[in-house]
Amino acid sequence: MAASSAARGKPSQKSDSPLKIFRDPKVVFAFALIFIDALLVFLIITFVPYTKIDWDAYMSQVTGFLQGERDYTNLKGDTGPLVYPAGFLYVYSAIHYVTGGLVYPAQILFGILYIVNLAILLFIYLKTDVLPWWALSLLCLSKRVHSIFVLRLFNDCFAVTLLHAALASLLFQRWHLGLIIFSGAVSIKMNVLLYAPPLLLLMLKAMNIGGVILALAGAAIVQILVGLPFIVSHPVAYISRAFNLGRVFIHFWSVNFKFVPEPIFISKPFAVSLLVAHLVLLATFAHYRWCKNEGGLLNFLHSRFVSMKLGVTGSSSFFKQLFSCNSTCKILNEDHIVTTMFVGNFIGILCARSLHYQFYSWYFFSLPYLLWKTPFPTFLRLILFVGVELCWNVFPSNIYSSALLLCIHLVILWGLWTAPAEYPYVNDKSLTRNKNK
């Protein structure tokens, strides 16, 4: 009788299990935020006039592509030539097909995209559990970001959504899948590459050399397949336009360095100085923060080099690891993954030669996390958050708003530098995934 009653009890436990997540007040609050923000997005689309900026140019470039043009130098719009990788064309071709090139249905699609992005972000924030429950609402409070998604329809929206999906995959230690999604984001807009240095470091920590090589190869294959129609026909035009790292932006639209005189702003020494600052900051954080528990960046890289050397020496075992699904890896702490990725991107934002208004979406969603990683009191965190949002809502930007934004960024970076570093690993023992077991 006891056995039969226990058996009868099992199904009810199973049926209740999906509802367990709703016992966490944070999860309930997150679902409430999604519902409320979805309603807000609906109201914005319905009552706030659409702002024409790049949509017509996007549709012109897509039309040329759909008509068979494969030379990137001939794909142009009213705002200039096409400067994005080919993934952009595929995404906006699909949007063109669904919407007929009309703005209103496209706004609805971007509204759905905004909610999907918010859901992914809330999952990341709940998984890391860095913020108090009420602070999750900060993710929904940006006037500028709502505008970027549903009133401007920028391609940045798709790029950051895929980036956040890749980051969510990494939290499950799905590095190969994460790299494929990451490469998909890069194929829409190159700004995602700001995450590449911290991502590579995390991969070196989490996987053996064979795993890293395979993951990078998967990302490279995505880029080749996406760009193949253009690489086959006009390779130089495609690579030079889609991956142009030397673009000089217009001083008028700069949000972060408007206080710098225009002759200096467009000069090469200024660009080189920012690049050097970027590399130095990345190396400094990597050495003293992200690799602190491994004895510093140089010691960590040396250990990886030694393991690679040993793998090459035992070439049969090396190739067995390279082409096998059975890989030895360390499980990284979720906080360490998100912190390293967000801080690495934030350093890139700080050192960016120019930030235009849509570029705010590149790092806004990481701001609450970064602020709660600093040792600052909550009141100061909120002041910094509001200060950043106010600077991004000054139009056009001026010397005061851009100088203030830089100062706030520097304060946040200082807070991240002085904060205690999280332990990077779930445990110290290498975990072997072996299908044969």
Image (spheres, rainbow, N blue to C red):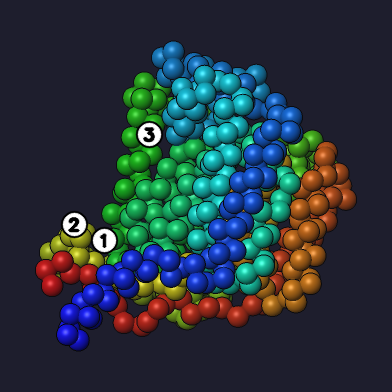
* Mark sitting on residue 270: none
Seen at 35% across and 36% down, the residue is 224
Residue 339 is left or right of residue 151, and the answer is left
Seen at 17% across and 85% down, the residue is 1
Residue closest to the far right:
400
Q: Amino acid at mark 2?
A: Phe
Point out residue 312 in the picture as x, y percentages from the top left corner: 21, 65
Seen at 69% across and 39% down, the residue is 43
Q: Which callout, 3 or 1, points to the residue nearer the camera?
A: 3
Point out residue 80 in the picture as x, y percentages from the top left corner: 63, 23
Residue closest to the far front:
1
Question: Dot 2 corresponds to which residue?
Answer: 323
Residue closest to the far top:
67
Upstream in the sequence, badge 3 or badge 1? 1
* Mark sitting on residue 226: 3
Question: Dot 1 corresponds to which residue?
Answer: 210
Which quadrant holds residue 157?
Answer: top right
- Name the residue nearer the viewer: 53 or 100: 100
Q: Residues within 10 Å of mark 2 (few under 14, many from 20)?
A: few
